[in-house]
Amino acid sequence: MNKKLRSIVQPSMILFFAVMVSLAIAAALLGQYILAGVQLAAAALLFFFYRWCGKRRRNALAEYVGTTNDLMSRAAEGEIPFPVALVELHDDELIWCNKPFSELTGVKDTLGAQYLTKILPEFSLQWLKNGHSESSDELCYHDRRFRVTGTLVPDEGADDKLGLIYLQDLTELLQVRDEYIRSRPMVCIVLVDNYDELTNNLTDAQISGLNAQINTHINEWSDRYGGLLRKLERNRYLALFEAKDLAAMAEEKFSLNERVRNVTNPGGVQATVSIGIGKDGADMRENYDFAALSIEMALSRGGDQAVIKDRYDFSFYGGRNKQGERRTKVKSRVMASSLAELIARSSSVFVMGHKMADLDAIGAAAGICCLCRTKGIPANIVVDPELNAAQTLIERLKPLEGYTDCFISGQDALLRADAKSLLVVVDTNRPDQVESKALLESLRRVVVIDHHRRAADYIEQPVLNLHEPFASSASEMVTELLQYAVDPGDIHTYEAEALLAGLVLDTKNFTVRAASRSFEAAAFLRKIGADTIEVKKLFKNDLPSTVARYRIIQNAKLYRGTIAIAALDYTATRVIAAQAADELLNISGIDASFVLYPQGDMTIISARSIGEANVQVILEPLGGGGNASTAGAQIKGKNVPAALEALVQSIDHFFDR
């Protein structure tokens, strides 16, 4: 070891001086005696200078080694009771270790080099090399768990750095910490979300029988995880679990949902439950608030699923099954009255939908403008004049009284808005998808009217929220509001046709998500003058658009036998992509379709389904949204091949889970 250290601090200079002497001798042989004398003198001076510098280095090293030796001696004698080791950082060679480290690892003194990577193969010193004083990962060794800290020796500026590491045995403390985390309470709310529909027109005996079956399933599920269960109301239960039970629940995919669906009433209606769980709150009250938010989120997404809310985000389980209609006109009547009152107390009203507004968004917006006109309140529709999918409808509405200057940009709306302005958001509930997010953030009074399943990021705390995930379209919802808020004669024919166009668009000509109330809304619009021929004209395409649509269809490939995926390497318009996705469903054997195309630095996905595939659930992990049969996504920072790979993984996860 002494020779090794000597070679490090005092490298051999024999060859250097030998060369200088050889050159002096050569000069003397050639008769250059003066040059030879100068070279010999220079060599002698350099030799003495080298010896003097070497002596200084040896003295400094001796002082450092002496200091280090004292430290190591004290550590070895027991002043440092936990394992300590000195390591060469560039190759992880073990230079020295104290007795506790030797006893822990079984390291013995040997003449050969020993390396930490072989002694502790799963442990890395990269954190110390990066300048950190503590490892972010704990060290597990022989059923013990250590916190590892370290320092650099002698200083951070040295070329060859040594690392002094300390292992602190915190096994018992970490076990207590883990047990605390595992035993933290979770608050769970279980709600029979179609209880009224389930018990409608049943006798007391039949209702008691249904309640007994539901109670049995919920009690068995709670007992399986050792939970404390109490029934709060006729269709609401409160349960307390420990955090360690959540993994088992998720692994079983919250089997309570499947079990309860086995309960049916005499009319064949299946019972469904929504599960809301709150965890990681500061106290039990906050966990309960999280659970209540989870239940609200589950219901707004269609029910029959489990939603978990922690301090940061929502997690979703289930929600794959397509649900029947669960709506009552009582809510529409109450909402119509409340919305009319809000509009009457506003100085102006701004209506906007999602980006790239379609016929449903513009149709619903036109219906709100009709309501504002009857109340004598000025209204504007916020839409991008260039980037929209309803230009034909907009041009048709502009000549009408009140619509000449009705369509404005988000920037103009910001300039016109004041403290008493009301913003009505239609056909979306996500703040990142609205036409003008700046306008949404600037106005305090916001109303949301939407039929899409609620995503994790949604418009929070609106003054009025009409969210019906079972409705076919926003136009259908606005039509129902108009039936209670205005006289039929106050609705312009073009406004009725705009609403009907939105309804036709989202129901795919009443073939998808068309419930009884969809036909009732269409009948009302037809009765007040909506012309189906004029509505059909709004869906006509020119020849280039038709060719582009069928070009996309030609590029489609089958996946899993019933899913058509068209991944384009060129930019398409959203309207054409959506139409192509719809058209693919007309092909025999195809139950779901996805069209992907690049747009700038992101990839756009348009998805449709008429089968078991819930495209909203499939696209949600990719940042998308929509409903079970119609959805879309914008994936930023990924090209089409990368987005396609992520989509395929999400499809596989949906069908395999």
Image (cartoon, rainbow, N blue to C red):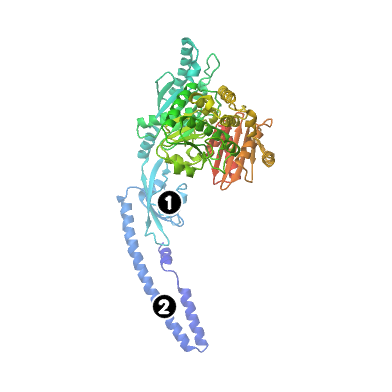
Q: Position of residue 9 (x, y in %)?
A: 41, 66
Q: Which residue was labeled with disc 1?
A: 127
Tell me how far mark 2 sits from mark 1, CA to CA.
Answer: 43 Å
Q: Are marks 2 and 1 in contact (CB under 8 Å)?
A: no
Q: Please, what is the three-letter code of the amino acid marked with disc 2? A: Leu
Give the amino acid at mark 1: Trp
- How would you rate the neighbour count of disc 2 (Cα within 10 Å): few for under 14, some for 14-19, many for 20 or more? few
**195 up-or-down from 562: above or below:** above
Vertically, is 488 above or below 181?
A: above
Rate crowding at label 1 as few (under 14), some (14 to 19) or many (20 or more) other CA atoms within 10 Å.
Answer: some
For the point 56% across and 28% down, the residue is: 472
Horizontal arrangement in the rendering, residue 388 relative to residue 110 (left or right)? right
Which quadrant holds the C terminus? Answer: top right
**Residue in view at x 36 percent, y 42 percent:** 170
In front: 657, or 106?
657
Q: Position of residue 269 (x, y in %)?
A: 54, 18
Quadrant in the rendering for residue 522:
top right
List x then y, in percent, for residue 213: 48, 16
Q: Is residue 201 shown above or below 95?
A: above
User: In the picture, residue 566 is in which quadrant?
Assistant: top right
Would you name the residue on which mark 2 appears?
46
Which of the two labelled residues, at mark 2 and mark 1, occupies the earlier sequence position?
A: 2
Quadrant showing the N terminus = bottom left
Q: Nearer the viewer, residue 158 or 119?
A: 158
Q: In terms of secondary structure, where does tag 1 sit?
A: helix
**Percent from the top left, x then y, of residue 42?**
43, 81
**Residue 643 seen from this side:** yes
